[in-house]
Image (spheres, coloured by chain):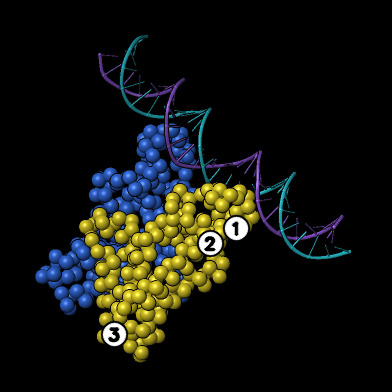
Chain colours: A yellow, B blue, C cyan, D purple
Amino acid sequence: MLIVEGHKHMAEVGFARFSAREVAKRIGYTIGTLYNVFGSYDRLLIAINTRTFVLWTDYIRKALDDGGEDRIRALVEGYFGFARANRNAWMAIYDHHLPPDFTMPPEHDMLRGELTDVVVAEVAAALPEAFRDQAPRLARSLVATVHGHCTFDLNGSFALMGERDPAGLALSRVRESLVNALERG
Amino acid sequence: MLIVEGHKHMAEVGFARFSAREVAKRIGYTIGTLYNVFGSYDRLLIAINTRTFVLWTDYIRKALDDGGEDRIRALVEGYFGFARANRNAWMAIYDHHLPPDFTMPPEHDMLRGELTDVVVAEVAAALPEAFRDQAPRLARSLVATVHGHCTFDLNGSFALMGERDPAGLALSRVRESLVNALERG
DNA sequence: GCGTAAATTGGATAGTGTTTAATATTTATA
DNA sequence: TATAAATATTAAACACTATCCAATTTACGC
């Protein structure tokens, strides 16, 4: 409940204006309670951002189910689609940096890693069987590629440079790499 | 002077712990003075981040000059090299989001755009003459690609996934796209 | 030296994350 | 059921933050 409401607050005001006090107030609690539950501001943000990851993964799984034959397109457009529809929450994932001494709780790593797993599976399926061992590394690289395009889309860099179809551009890069891997091994 | 010291403070403590008061104190001024000069916190951050862009562009130009024949490699490694050597300042560029009503002052857009110009020129030089009109769009896409890899490098995503050479991975993607553009037009 | 303009100050305001001692509530035990 | 122990919740205090602005100091041309 705290996380759900915290997530809503993040989606409404964004990372810069986010406030733990405000989250507590929204549920009718006090800041102290929230601190007894989460222990620190960072842990609250981790919980909220992990929720965003889970919603994102669901969104992409649904996009794959409803996207027809072209699963790579569904994947890329699902990535962009969620980010665009959930600007503030999506950006908060990358706005929040853990302190150097802090390590992410393993269960959060697991939940967040599912998104990568989905992509690895699709990349593997798009490669000939003989080269499927290369799928994880290629998948990571393609996620980074799409992520870069998505970031520049949402932060206005692409608009500034006159680019009107960032998602299409990202999809071109991904297809290119898959064809290349297919042809050259 | 304010900007130089502000940039140093950002490099030392990072976006999350950055404080305008602290910057003023470092020069022996008061917070009020800083506000009279910059008008707002956002404008101070814009100035600091533009300085980072300028230093970054210089760094990459030097990497190109000293990088020998393989200019594309020099470009990608220059991108990563600066980001890794200036973590906090580099990340602050993307941590700071302008308020929706706010527009970037044109002279800052100009200065920041020079980095893109450098990349466009190198991409154009790497393409056959007949296809150089495609250079700007391809260059933007490749910058986004490298940016995504660099982001995942610095935020630990790649380390978490077991990727040990993010810069090499990014370079592979860039080469791939250039070869593809060269072969297919 | 004088007067105007610019630069600088520091306090006030309203917010933030964080901690803590006290209080209230729930749960479990005898 | 009555009491003791554990848990949850609170409010206040602390040390910060950005932001604003009236008052003061400094600088400079005449």
Task: Report the residue marked by disc 2.
Answer: A47
Q: Position of residue B141 (x, y in %)?
A: 26, 66
The quarter of the rendered structure image containing the C terminus of chain B is bottom left
Q: Amino acid at mark 1?
A: Phe
Q: Is residue B108 left or right of residue B14?
A: left
- State the residue at coordinates (14%, 71%): B128
Above or below, comparing residue A52 to residue A20 in the picture: below
Instruction: Check disc 1 and report its element: helix, strand or loop.
Output: helix
Task: Report the residue marked by disc 3.
Answer: A182
- State the residue at coordinates (25%, 45%): B106
Q: Position of residue A16 (x, y in %)?
A: 44, 50
Q: Report whether residue A95 is seen.
A: no
Residues marked 2 and 1 touching at CB (< 8 Å): yes
Sooner in the amino-acid sequence: mark 2 or mark 1: 1
Q: Is residue B122 left or right of residue A72?
A: left
Please name whichever residue, A46 or B56, is drawn nearer the observer in this view of the structure.
A46
